[in-house]
């Protein structure tokens, strides 16, 4: 059985997180329920800062808000001294509502609207991560009209293919993101940015992919980016920041063995120093944007088990046992999107022997398989199932498919459990529906 952060088995024999009994959480707040371990989140933030600054003093860490964005999370990020990256007007507004300092915000996106760019200027966002020439021109024009200067990073594409699922690769040459280094677009973008009168060009950025279980892709990207800095300096271009994105993977299943934060930092900072020195370059500010590796393992989703069904399988001996829970694709679309895998435990008896091979299925009108062929203790109807490592991209990607309300999110620490996102009700689900007058006011049905 894997345990993360403050998870333990308490005296009742129940899974406990942040000093809170998960069975009591399920009864108090209902299921499905996202449970976030505050102490683990804070500890991961601190580990990132300590580890990277130990190896490369001038480092800033930005939390990738797309992985888990709520107003309460923005407060935690601010209190722990991290920068924050956002990728939409909605995420930017969330940060604003939380009182997050705008000068520490990085604004991402491959197709930012004019309204979003103007919003970044009005709020005083510290860095807009510019993705294309049109965006650079628009931002310069908007900044001129607003009598402001926009701080930017240019997102570059290093042209490497990381070893991860094809749908979460972003650093290869054939991608919608950024300015390609190999075809000369990146150098042309640097020159253009420096010519813009209302742009403060601060540096360059890249991101190679997500859920990476080794450092190979990051090391390749770092070498390419530092070589680019050297070529840019030879061309007379100067800038002071190097942002190498995020992407460090986590343990979704027990066989996943990603580098620790400390191992990750040691390898990258040592390489950064040696490569910069090899080219005779001044050391720029180094930035990273971890998300999943800060919140992923800190999240657990609790479900209530409903039907249990054994189904004969004609193409192989035996039966498949389907264990259905009260959520599914609407609170965790990742298995359906890119074959994400998880492990789970019966939270009301986590130490019972995992001796039954089952398939965990959701309640939606699709195949809606959460976990295919996983070993758990023999389940009973009404048991609480805890699925590990659901802190990243689960709440962020949740939907109202089949008009299910999105679950509540609770933040736990030292025996306290606080709702940071309320559960959606059936009233919430129709709150934006509008019935045109021409459809009438009654339920007149043709017979």
Image (cartoon, helix red, strand yellow):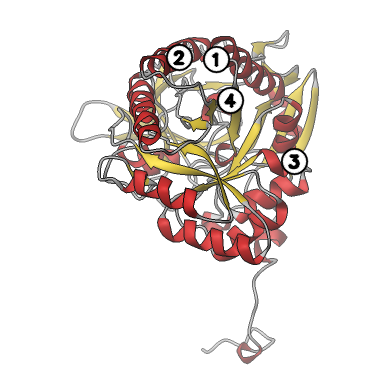
Dot 4 crowding, Cα within 10 Å, few <14, some 14–19, many 20+? many
Left or right side of 319 for 95: right
How far apart in space, not on screen, are marks 3 and 1 (Cα)? 26 Å
Q: Real-space Cα distance between discs 2 and 3?
A: 32 Å
Identify residue for label 1: 56
Q: CA distance from mark 2 to mark 1?
A: 8 Å
Image location of residue 377, percent across then percent down: 49, 17
N-term-proximal mark, 2 vs 3: 3
Question: What element does badge 1 sit on?
Answer: loop
Instruction: Give the label on residue 90, or none.
Output: none
Write the residue at 64% across / 71% down.
433
Is residue 278 shown to the viewer in this render? yes
| Residue toward you, 110 or 432 | 110
Location of residue 324 with respect to 348 vertically, above or below: below
Which residue is denoted by mark 4 in the rendering?
294
Q: Earlier in the sequence, mark 3 or mark 1?
A: 1
Q: Earlier in the sequence, mark 3 or mark 4?
A: 3
Foreground: disc 3 or disc 1? 1
Question: Residue beneath label 2, please?
Answer: 273
Circles 2, 1 touching at the beta carbon (< 8 Å) = yes
* Relative depth, front residue between 200 and 299: 200
Q: Earlier in the sequence, mark 2 or mark 1?
A: 1
Q: SS of the residue at dot 4?
A: helix
Mark 3 lies on residue: 100
Q: CA distance from mark 1 to mark 4?
A: 20 Å
Callout 2 touching callout 4 (CB < 8 Å): no
């Amino acid at each position: 059985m894997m345990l993360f952060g403050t998870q333990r088995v308490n005296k009742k024999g129940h899974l406990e997180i942040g000093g809170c009994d998960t069975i009591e959480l399920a009864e108090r707040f209902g299921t499905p329920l996202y449970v976030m371990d505050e102490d683990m989140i804070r500890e991961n933030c601190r580990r990132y800062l300590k580890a990277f600054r130990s190896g490369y003093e001038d480092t800033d860490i930005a939390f990738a808000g797309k992985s888990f964005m709520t107003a309460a999370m923005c407060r935690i990020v601010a209190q722990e001294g991290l920068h924050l990256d956002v990728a939409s007007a909605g995420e930017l507004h969330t940060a604003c509502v939380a009182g997050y300092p705008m000068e520490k915000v990085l604004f991402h996106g491959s197709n930012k609207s004019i309204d979003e760019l103007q919003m970044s200027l009005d709020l005083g966002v510290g860095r807009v991560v510019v993705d294309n020439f049109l965006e650079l021109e628009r931002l310069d024009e908007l900044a001129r009209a607003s009598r402001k200067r926009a701080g930017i990073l240019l997102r570059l594409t290093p042209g490497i293919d990381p070893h991860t699922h094809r749908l979460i690769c972003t650093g290869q040459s054939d991608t919608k993101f950024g300015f390609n280094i190999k075809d000369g677009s990146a150098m042309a973008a640097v020159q253009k940015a420096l010519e813009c009168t209302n742009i403060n060009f601060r540096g360059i950025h890249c991101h190679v992919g997500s859920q990476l279980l080794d450092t190979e892709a990051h090391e390749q990207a770092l070498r390419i980016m530092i070589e680019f800095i050297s070529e840019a300096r030879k061309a007379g271009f100067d800038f002071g920041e190097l942002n190498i994105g995020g992407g460090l993977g986590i343990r979704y299943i027990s066989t996943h063995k990603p580098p620790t934060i400390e191992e990750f930092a040691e390898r990258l900072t040592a390489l950064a120093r040696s490569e910069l020195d090899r080219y005779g370059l001044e050391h720029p500010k180094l930035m990273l944007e971890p998300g999943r590796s800060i919140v992923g393992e800190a999240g657990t989703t609790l479900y209530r088990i409903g039907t249990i069904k054994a189904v004969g399988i004609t193409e192989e001996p035996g039966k498949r046992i389907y264990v259905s829970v009260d959520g599914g694709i609407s609170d965790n679309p990742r298995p359906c999107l890119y074959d994400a895998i998880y492990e789970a435990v019966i939270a009301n008896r986590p130490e019972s022997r995992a001796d039954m091979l089952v398939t965990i299925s959701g309640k939606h009108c699709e195949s809606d398989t959460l976990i295919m062929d996983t070993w758990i203790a023999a389940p009973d109807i009404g048991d609480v199932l805890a699925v590990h490592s659901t802190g990243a991209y689960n709440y962020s990607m949740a939907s109202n498919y089949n008009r299910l309300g999105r679950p509540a999110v609770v933040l736990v620490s030292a025996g306290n459990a606080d709702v940071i996102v309320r559960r959606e009700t059936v009233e919430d689900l129709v709150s934006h529906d509008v019935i045109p007058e021409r459809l009438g006011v009654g339920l007149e049905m043709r017979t």
